[in-house]
Image (tube, rainbow, N blue to C red):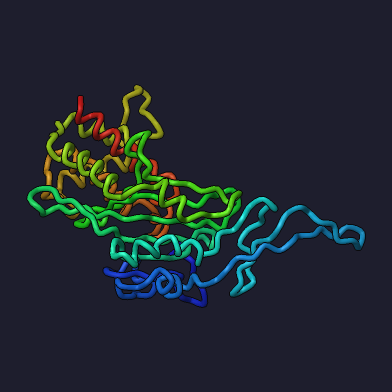
Amino acid sequence: MSHELEMIDGKASMAYAGDVPWHGLGVKVSNDLTPQQMLEAAGLDWTVDPVELFAEVDGRSIPTGRRALIRSTDQKMIDVITDDWNPCQNSEAFEFFNDFVAAGDMEMETAGSLKDGKIVWALAKVKESFELFGGKDQVDAYLHFTNPHSYGQSIDVRFTPIRVVCNNTLTLSLSQKSKNMVKVSHRRQFDGDAVKEALGVAKEKLATYKEMAQYLSQKRYTNEKIEDYFKRIFPVLTQKSEGAKLLSKSADRALEIIKFDEQPGAEFGKGTWWEAFNATTYMVDHEIGRSADTRLQSAWYGANRGLKTKALELAVEMADA
């Protein structure tokens, strides 16, 4: 199996609390770890150090104006950067969660490294949630922190709701005014307090998403509209000679999931736009892709992150119609 999750000395650079994720990779830990303890359990207690790069020309070493980002534990070159790009060390990044965890507002859930150390992430569970259908369908709130050791990438903090029954994740823009996502350029020093202030309180974001979820759970689709929905989420790349649109394989699979109640939690909101939206997130998180961790990478950092946002926005749009 091809891994986006980094493997060091045959072990996955990842720690997790709760259920075993991603084919059992990583180290299982308790849910009461401090951010520093989670960092160490995930094998992320290393630094990246900029080292000047030179070009050898006629026996002379000429500065290139670039620096290599070298990992302290194995001297591996993670990336090449410029002088104005400031690395944020993993220990600094995880300090972001200290006050939240110490106050009992959050628990560290998972942490790990992707793409040979270029992406380091931490996911912390916020002790807030909401329920639909008489408490049977629960959505928990998380903060997802990404510290990229990759030139041109920014530190990224997002509000991420997760539907418990099927472990479907979502990072979304609730509105233009929402601060559910914060980016901090590596061209200035990371300031955790400033990020916390900009991010605001996760309760506000969860309340907004709760309103959207409740709305979708009360609006029913027709057979014609649900087919059109999946056609627009998973469009075909080719057409018949007559010009009639076909269903793509992914759209056909989504309809199959709906028809045969194949996703966990299918009994909640049957026939509603909440079911339709969750069929999309279920496919992205659990089916589309070569392996579980390539799905993770795409759902959090690749094209499928935008696909889930599109699915939510389109579900609300079609429920309004």
Where residue 64 appears, as percent x and y from the top left, is 78, 54
Q: Position of residue 206 (x, y in %)?
A: 26, 47
277 lies left or right of 219: right
Instruction: Check the picture and name the quadrant holding the C terminus.
Output: top left
Residue 3 shows in this picture: no
Front residue of this view, candidates 218 and 257: 218
Quarter where residue 48 is shown: bottom right
Closer-to-camera residue (121/319): 121
Q: Residue at x 75, y 60 (%)?
A: 53
Where in the figure is residue 89, as x and y percent of width and height? 55, 63
> In what quadrant of the picture does the N terminus appear?
bottom left
Q: Give the residue drawn at x 25%, y 43%.
A: 209
* Residue 221 shows in the view: yes
Q: State the residue at coordinates (49%, 66%).
A: 6
Q: Extreme bottom residue here?
A: 9
Q: Tell me if residue 253 comes above or below residue 14 in the rendering.
A: above
Q: Is residue 92 left or right of residue 249?
A: right
Query: Which residue is at the far top?
Result: 242
Q: Residue furthest left?
A: 134
308 lies above or below 296: above
**Residue in the picture at 40% in, 71% down:** 38
Q: Where is residue 149? Give x, y as percent.
A: 56, 58
Nearer to me, 65 or 206: 206
Tag count: 0
Decide which of 307, 65 is in the foreground and name it: 65
